[in-house]
């Protein structure tokens, strides 16, 4: 079995190296026909390209991107100067000037049109050498696990260099560096200093409240165990994930070969060429399916975990990937029907509303469906089943965390300080999503981009950049091997914050405990991905209704004594969540106090 797993690991490494190496394969040769844009933009870009000497010149991918982006900057500045003398008659300002939001679009379009090389000539071959080998390798590594003795075994998770995590100081340093770097890049990219400064001010205010107002200077326990030595394989894995998200969100012109490779699959599903979002959705689905099989092998002794894994695999494959592709093939709106506001923060953006309104009955149905889902569906389902119905059974973010992120679930910070950060940040993001959406709707209905002196367009852009890309992608997924698999769900997801508020106060769901049987092994706390010190609740006989709990049930699955149970029961007995429950035995009666 070990030999088969080593073969699988080798195939996966080959596929990963091929995937990364593809970034430098091929060449670019730009002609006038490849230059994107309307009449004014194309003329300006062509002139700048001729002056730069890159027309009809064969170049490497990286070299071409660098040169062409400089060409775009030159064209943008030239159009800005010409506009000062007056715009042509009947021409909109941004049909003449080149906006910053057009730069990446034009760069990606030109790279795609002018590319040549082995990937363009043999996309299916490279698809097999990357995704094909990765799938085969992953399955060869996973399938032998089905023949192991069922049950949870730690198997050295705190000794393996990939899964043991990193030292607290290094982890904190990497996180702070990443946040600061994203904010600085956002200032450079967005050209707006106001919202980066607001973000920094809010961050400092939260730190002040956590450290000083609440007196949280204690640093224990950071997690169920702390590594003596940093897991360097985990850091490498984290950097690979972070690098992928940076390229996907902010440097899409560099990943043209990856997108080209999946063109044939895109054409067969939706009848159009692939985009970076098709690539991402396909990768997301494949990863969840393969790692879902790993979940089925690991938790084969637990029916609840098996059914839950099947559920997230089904919803991602059908609702998030295949159904939108089929809808797109028939020129219909193609949203992820299981996603909802405020997690889907673009739901009320003008282009989304216009698209739905222009598609008749189907579009109106999708609009009403989205509104009803978060306004009525969420409170009703959470009341009966807790937030687990979405976070652990339906959500794509949660599905990726539960499958690809499962090897890192033990790295979640269990300290009281982390819990306090969690409460401030997640509810802060939720408020920010509401404010941003109010601004977007105000602009949509009034046409004004200013409300109370704030520019709604810049707020929308910054939220999408910092929260939608930086937090949910760079930190939320890239930090799986560094801080655990539910960083985004725990600290950032505005929908999780909304679900959690209802679960905390108006839900029948709770994890009940039988403290008399607890042997303090700590398995429950170790495997809690949401940073809950479950053992402390179990030792007190205290039921768990924490708003952050996603009801994954892994704590119950790994408990050797059956102390923990997921239940939907009456929510009127406040004693079930009392600070401490003790059993008093006297002659003829037993009292629980």
Image (cartoon, rainbow, N blue to C red):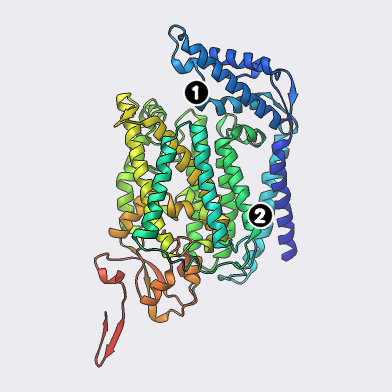
Residue 215, relative to residue 200: is it above or below? below
In this view, which residue lies farthest toward the top?
89
In terms of image quadrants, where is residue 267?
A: top right
What residue sits 63% from the left and 16% below the top?
A: 48
In the image, 78 versus 554, the foreground residue is 78
Residue 420: x and y in percent read 39, 59
The quarter of the picture where the N terminus appears is bottom right
Q: Name the residue under label 1.
A: 99
Q: Residue at x 38, y 55 (%)?
A: 208
- Image height of 261 relative to 116, above or below: below
User: Regarding mark 1 in the picture, which secondary structure is present there?
Assistant: loop
Q: In which quarter of the image is residue 57?
A: top right
Image x and y of residue 174, in percent: 56, 53
Q: Residue furthest bottom?
A: 587
Of callouts 1 and 2, which one flags the residue occurring earlier in the amino acid sequence? 1
- Tell me if label 1 and label 2 are in contact, CB under 8 Å: no
Residue 138: which numbered mark, if any? Answer: 2
Q: Residue 220, image x and y in percent?
A: 46, 68
Q: Residue 228 carries which label?
A: none
Does any portion of residue 403 appear in the rendered image? no
SS at circle 2: helix
> Dot 1: within a 10 Å radius of its alpha carbon, few (fewer than 14), some, or many (20 or more) residues?
few
Q: Nearer the viewer, residue 400 or 467?
A: 467
171 with respect to 544 (left or right): right
- Which marked residue is nearer to the observer: mark 1 or mark 2? 1
Q: Which residue is pictured at 38% across the width and 52% down the height?
A: 206
Q: Distance between the residues labelled 1 and 2?
A: 44 Å
**Residue 171: in sight, yes or no?**
yes
Q: Where is residue 232 in the image (x, y as percent from the top left)?
A: 65, 58
How many numbered badges does the structure rendering display?
2
């Amino acid at each position: 079995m070990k030999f088969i797993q080593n073969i699988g690991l080798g195939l996966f490494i080959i596929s990963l190296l091929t995937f990364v190496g593809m970034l430098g394969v091929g060449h670019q040769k730009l002609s006038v026909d490849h230059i994107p844009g309307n009449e004014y933009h194309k003329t300006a870009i062509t002139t700048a390209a001729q002056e730069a000497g890159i027309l009809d010149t064969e170049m490497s991918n990286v070299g071409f991107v660098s040169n062409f982006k400089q060409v775009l900057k030159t064209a943008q500045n030239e159009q800005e100067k010409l506009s000062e003398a007056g715009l042509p008659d009947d021409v909109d300002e941004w049909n003449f000037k080149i906006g910053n939001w057009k730069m990446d679009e034009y760069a990606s379009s030109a790279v795609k049109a002018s590319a040549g090389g082995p990937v363009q000539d043999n996309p299916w071959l490279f698809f097999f050498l990357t995704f094909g080998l990765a799938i085969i390798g992953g399955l060869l590594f996973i399938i032998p696990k089905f023949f192991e003795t069922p049950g949870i075994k730690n198997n050295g998770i705190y000794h393996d260099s990939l899964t043991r995590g990193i030292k607290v100081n290094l982890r904190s340093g990497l996180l702070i560096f990443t946040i600061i770097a994203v904010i600085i890049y956002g200032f450079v990219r967005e050209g707006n200093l106001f919202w980066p400064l607001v973000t920094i001010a809010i961050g400092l205010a939260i730190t002040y409240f956590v450290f000083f107002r609440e007196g949280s200077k204690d640093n224990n326990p950071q997690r169920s165990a702390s590594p003596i030595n940093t897991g360097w394989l985990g850091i490498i894995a984290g950097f690979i994930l972070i690098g992928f998200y940076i390229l996907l969100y902010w440097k899409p012109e560099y990943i043209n070969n990856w997108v080209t490779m999946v063109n044939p699959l895109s054409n067969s599903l939706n009848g159009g060429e692939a985009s970076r979002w098709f690539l991402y959705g396909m990768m997301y689905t494949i990863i969840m399916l393969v790692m879902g099989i790993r979940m089925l092998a690991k938790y084969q002794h637990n029916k609840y975990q098996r059914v839950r894994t099947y559920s997230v695999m089904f919803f991602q494959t059908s609702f998030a990937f295949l159904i939108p592709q089929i809808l797109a093939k028939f020129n219909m709106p193609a949203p992820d029907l299981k996603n909802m506001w405020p997690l889907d923060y673009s739901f009320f953006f003008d282009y989304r509303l216009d698209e739905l309104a222009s598609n008749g009955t189907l579009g109106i149905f999708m609009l009403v469906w989205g509104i009803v889902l978060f306004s009525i569906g969420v409170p009703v389902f959470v009341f009966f089943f807790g937030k687990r119905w979405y976070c652990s059974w339906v959500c794509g973010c949660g599905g990726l965390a539960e499958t690809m992120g499962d090897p890192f679930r033990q790295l979640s910070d269990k300290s009281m300080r982390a819990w306090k950060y969690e409460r401030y940040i997640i509810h802060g993001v939720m408020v920010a999503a509401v404010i941003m959406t109010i601004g977007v709707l105000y602009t949509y209905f009034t046409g004004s981009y200013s409300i109370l002196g704030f520019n709604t367009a810049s707020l929308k852009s910054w939220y999408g950049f910092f929260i939608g890309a930086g937090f949910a992608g760079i930190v939320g997924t890239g930090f799986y091997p560094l801080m655990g698999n539910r960083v985004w769900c725990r600290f950032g997801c505005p929908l999780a914050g909304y679900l959690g508020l209802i679960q905390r106060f108006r839900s029948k769901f709770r994890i009940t405990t039988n403290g008399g049987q607890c042997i303090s092994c700590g398995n429950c706390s170790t495997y809690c991905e949401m940073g809950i010190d479950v053992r402390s609740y179990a030792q007190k006989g205290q039921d768990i209704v924490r708003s952050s709990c996603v009801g994954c049930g892994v704590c119950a699955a790994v408990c050797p004594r059956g102390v923990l149970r997921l239940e939907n029961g009456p929510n009127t007995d406040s004693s079930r969540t009392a600070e401490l429950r003790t059993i008093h035995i006297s002659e003829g009666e037993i009292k629980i106090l």
